[in-house]
Amino acid sequence: MNLPEELKYTKSHEWVSYLPDGSAKIGLTDFAQKELGDIVFVNLPQEGDSVEAGAAFADVESVKAVSDVYCPVTGTVQAVNEELLDAPEQLNKAPYESWMVRVGDISKTEELLSAGEYLTFLSGKEGD
């Protein structure tokens, strides 16, 4: 499984990449996109929207279902990856290059996992 070491992960299968300016890019993990199947639609927030750690900020529609995407941080949406609106399949093709939003003014962060901790978490899930 593809798990870049420099990223942080959530138990709800989002990844976080902290940027030098203190903002963070957020996307779906490789595990999430495989579980969802072919993603056909993405509903993203608007720039300037407030997002809250642990709350849904977007949703993705796949051939299997519609699923909420949860924000791992509290802050303000600084940018939205508009390319995903026309090409949501990029989340399947390149999950770690296809960020969904960039959040700034971060005031709270959910419990984030390292790549190793996330892999351990996934190993426990597979036995369920």
Image (cartoon, rainbow, N blue to C red):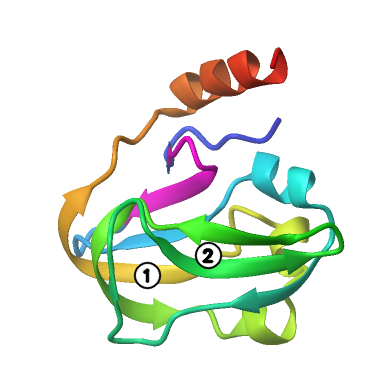
User: Do the CB atoms of the residues marked 1 and 2 lie less than 8 Å apart?
Assistant: yes
Q: How many marks?
A: 2
Tag shown at residue 46: none
- Residue type for callout 1: Arg
Q: Which residue is mark 2?
A: 99
Measuring from the top left, give residue 106's x and y in whole percent: 18, 61
The quarter of the rendered structure image containing the N terminus is: top right
- Residue type for callout 2: Trp
Measuring from the top left, give residue 60's x and y in whole percent: 65, 67
Q: Residue at x 34, y 36 (%)?
A: 112
Give the camera-side residue of 127 and 95: 127
Measuring from the top left, give residue 16's x and y in whole percent: 40, 50
Q: Which residues are magenta?
A: 9-18
Q: Is residue 116 above or below residue 16?
A: above
Q: Which residue is mark 1?
A: 102
Residue 24, quarter of picture = bottom left
Measuring from the top left, give residue 77's x and y in whole percent: 32, 76
Q: Is residue 79 above or below residue 98?
A: below
Query: Is residue 12 part of the magenta span, yes or no?
Result: yes
Give the camera-side residue of 117 and 61: 61
Q: In the rendered view, does 81 fall on the left or right side of 16?
A: right
The quarter of the rendered structure image containing the C terminus is: top right
Q: Is residue 126 above or below residue 19?
A: above
Q: Residues within 10 Å of mark 2 (few under 14, many from 20)?
A: many
Query: Is residue 63 part of the magenta span, yes or no?
Result: no
Q: CA distance from mark 1 to mark 2?
A: 8 Å
Q: In the rendered view, does 122 fall on the left or right side of 37?
A: left
